[in-house]
Image (cartoon, helix red, strand yellow):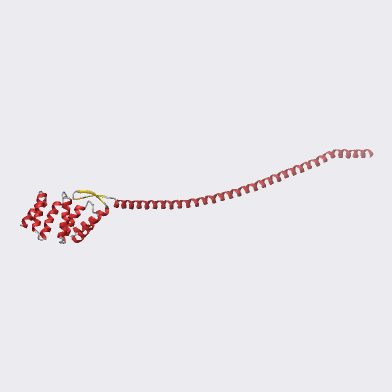
Amino acid sequence: MRTILRVSVAGLCLGAALFAPAARAGLFDDDEARRAILDIRQRIDQNTERQRSGQQQLTEQIDQLKRSLLDLNNQLEQMRGDNASLRGQNEELTRIVSELQRRQKDLQAGLDDRMRKMEPQKVSVDGKEFSADPEEKRQYDEAMDLLRKSDFAGTANALSAFRKRYPASGYNESALFWLGNAQYGVRQYKEAIISFRTLVAGSPDHPKAPEALLAIANCQAELKDGKGARKTIDELLKTYPKSEAAQAGRERLASLK
């Protein structure tokens, strides 16, 4: 009995001795596992925090990028508006410059016209070429227009005024001849004789000089001065024997006898 008891106690002691290291090993494994789990959790938490922080930074960067893009878009819109305004200003400036150029061209053309009107012009009357001022030519032409309309009184007045204003004009001989004709037309025979005689005395080589002598004879005939008319025709025949006026003078002389 005591032998059996000792064996049992010994077995128990042996079992306890064998069991004790296993128990300590189990406890050690649990602590390691817990620490490993805690470490893993800590790492997970750290990773999660880093991800959260990284996500937040990324979100902020995206927001900043959005704001930058929005600001850039606003700047682009402003630039578009400025460019449109500049285009409008350029178009307006182009229009203004074009208008100024047109006005300058018109002014230059007007100035050129006025200068041309003021510049002497080459004219030819009765085979004589000379320079005449535009106003001088205009007044002479107006007088000739009156003569063509048979306005002899108006012609006489216009040519008398013309000779006073332009005493040295190249039109002078022609003006004297047609003045005499206009005076003859209004029966101012004495005045006509003076005009014709002034032409012959001052310009005996003028193409109208023979006709002027014949006109003087006609005026004298109208004044009943037959003797004077015959004398003037004799002068015509001696001075310009081959002229058409001389032929007409011979016919006229026959009627005076």
* Residue 83 relative to residue 172: left or right: right
User: Can see residue 190?
Assistant: yes
Q: Residue at x 83, y 40 (%)?
A: 24
Q: Where is residue 244 shown, x and y percent of the image? A: 11, 51
Residue most extreme to the right: 2
Q: In front here: 225 or 31? A: 225
* Residue 71 relative to residue 130: left or right: right
Looking at the rendering, in which quadrant would you find the C terminus?
bottom left
Q: Residue at x 39, y 52 (%)?
A: 100
User: Can see residue 240?
Assistant: no
Q: Residue at x 16, y 58 (%)?
A: 192
Image vertical order of residue 241 relative to residue 17, above or below: below
Q: In front here: 5 or 22? A: 22
* Residue 113 relative to residue 63: left or right: left
Q: Where is residue 144 shown, x and y percent of the image? A: 20, 56
Q: In front here: 4 or 129? A: 129
Q: Where is residue 30 shown, x and y percent of the image? A: 78, 42
Q: In front here: 255 or 3? A: 255
Image vertical order of residue 5 relative to residue 234, above or below: above
